[in-house]
Image: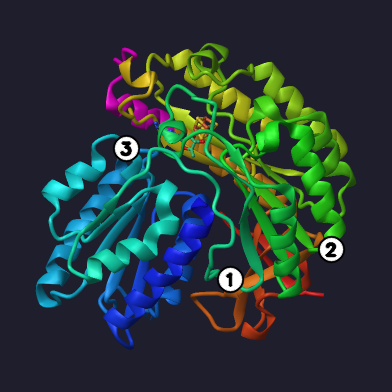
Amino acid sequence: MEQEYDRFSREMDARAVRDAIGEGKKYHIVVYGCQMNVRDGETAAGLLEEMGFSRAESREDADLVLFETCCVRENAENRALGNVIWLKELKRDKPDLLIAVGGCMMQEPGMAERIRKMYPFVDIVFGTHNLYRLRHLVREAVEGRRGIEILGEGGLQEGLPAVRQSSFSAFVNIMYGCNNFCSYCIVPYVRGRERSRAQEDILEEARRLRDSGVQEITLLGQNVNSYQGGGAAFAELLRRLDEMGIPRIRFMTSHPKDLSDELIAAFGSLKHLCGHLHLPVQSGSDRILREMNRHYTREKYLSLVERLRAVRPDIGLTTDIIVGFPGETEEEFRETLSLCREVRYDAAFTFIYSPRQGTRAASMPDDTPAAEKTRRIEELIALQHEHTASALASQVGRVERVLVEGVSERSSETVMGKTSRFLAVNFPGKADLVGSFVDVRITGAGRNTLRGERV
Ligand code: 5AD
Ligand code: SF4
């Protein structure tokens, strides 16, 4: 019943908006945070285009500006709010401008109410669970009411339109939400419990992408290893996708506690699975890992790395690390550095711990001065630079298959693409190569990228 009603009302809303907004209206979407938000932004674009909006070249050019917010760390929130306030100025010159704010941050308790009261120029507020209601909310706004709606939890919505950012590389959601409750993390509170899409729906989407010429898919989920309840189910999904013949398959993010034997084996056996794994470690100290509620030890993590390298010696590993978790001692921080030395990541995303209201860690005593945390992260970043440089240097002389992603910003005669291991390569070439595979001999390594030439 619910589904039937929704389909009917969505179409009604889209038609009503099309009639009300008139011709030639444009939208601009600003995305903060992770790939899940990027993918949500693509769905929002699809919904808006169905209503008759087209993409604006810039924010100033738009009739509707949508912010997809992130709440994982405080600075992401501040940046989003700062930009929303900045739009108030734009609206002074352009009173019909519609301002919409969606995403994780709106799911925080009390946030929508705060926006309603303190930011009266915001017309539309929605959360991650009711993105599919965007047409209805825009309809309310164009009819002069503020469209503010947050749902506490959501089911799965299949069949929503999307305008994908790339014609050759696509994100595919396989699951939503998270059950892990790492003690520092707000995601389970805002994105809700884990919900997996049906395997058939995912395969159908992948088939359609393949038939439209997509060369690479990246499966998305907060913890893909618990897709439909376990690593075996995820490995099975990968196997079926591998048979489909899409040249490259990637996925993120994996939780070390759920990295199954089947998934490790997949890195040795699947033809299209890329040689890269993002495996957030967060800390190298067992005590901190326990306090973080991560459910693995340093030793367990290192044994996963060893087994991955046994089945795929050239696999590239990347990670996320938090420094300055409440109570982290200098010695415990040094254990993170030594873990990095053992693993030698290709890249690491490093963060200073940011307390998030409502999480368990937010009430833990934290007496490490901010300046000390900054010093720690700087030391970690410097070490990572060394490891990135040596990973890049190890590639010189090899011939790698590169999927070309775009033309360099610096020169129209240079293109940039990625190897299977997710390393960026610049080499001479023109726009006609974008979206295709090229064999490239790696001739040099810079700070963050490789240089090469076509063979
Ligand atoms: N403070 C700092 N970093 C955090 N992350 C998640 N929550 C926090 C927080 N409260 C980091 C983790 C996670 C990545 C997406 O963001 O490292 O893996
Ligand atoms: Fe947050 Fe942990 Fe879930 Fe990742 S696994 S989204 S860090 S709670």
Residues at discs 2 and 1 in contact (Cβ within 8 Å) = no
Residue lying at 76% horizontally and 49% vertically, measured from the top left: 275
Residue lying at 47% horizontally and 43% vertically, measured from the top left: 154
Cα–Cα span, label 2 and label 3: 41 Å
Q: Quadrant of ligand 1?
A: top left
Label 2, ligand 2: CB separation under 8 Å:
no
Query: Which residue is tagged 1?
Result: 166
Residue 426's image quarter? bottom right
Q: Is residue 229 left or right of residue 159?
A: right
> Tag 3 or tag 2, which sits nearer the N-term?
3
> Tag 1 or tag 2, which sits nearer the N-term?
1
**Which element type, helix, strand or loop, lies under badge 2?**
loop
Which circle, 3 or 1, is nearer the viewer?
A: 3
Cα–Cα span, label 2 and label 1: 19 Å
The percent position of residue 430, horizontal first and vertical second, equals: 64, 84
Label 3, ligand 1: CB separation under 8 Å:
no
Task: Classify the position of the C terminus by image quarter.
Answer: bottom right
Q: Residue furthest right?
A: 269
Q: Is residue 83 left or right of residue 187?
A: left
Q: Is residue 264 left or right of residue 428?
A: right
**Is 10 situated above or below 338?**
below
- Between residue 380 and residue 184, name the one nearer to us: 184
Q: Mark 1 belongs to which amino acid? A: Ser
The answer to whether residue 14 is visible is: yes
**Is 297 situated above or below 257?**
above
Tell me where the magenta segment starts and ends, as one range: 364-378
Label 1, ligand 1: CB separation under 8 Å:
no
Q: Is residue 376 magenta?
A: yes
Query: Which residue is tagged 3?
Result: 108
Residue 375's image quarter? top left
Residues at discs 2 and 3 in contact (Cβ within 8 Å) = no
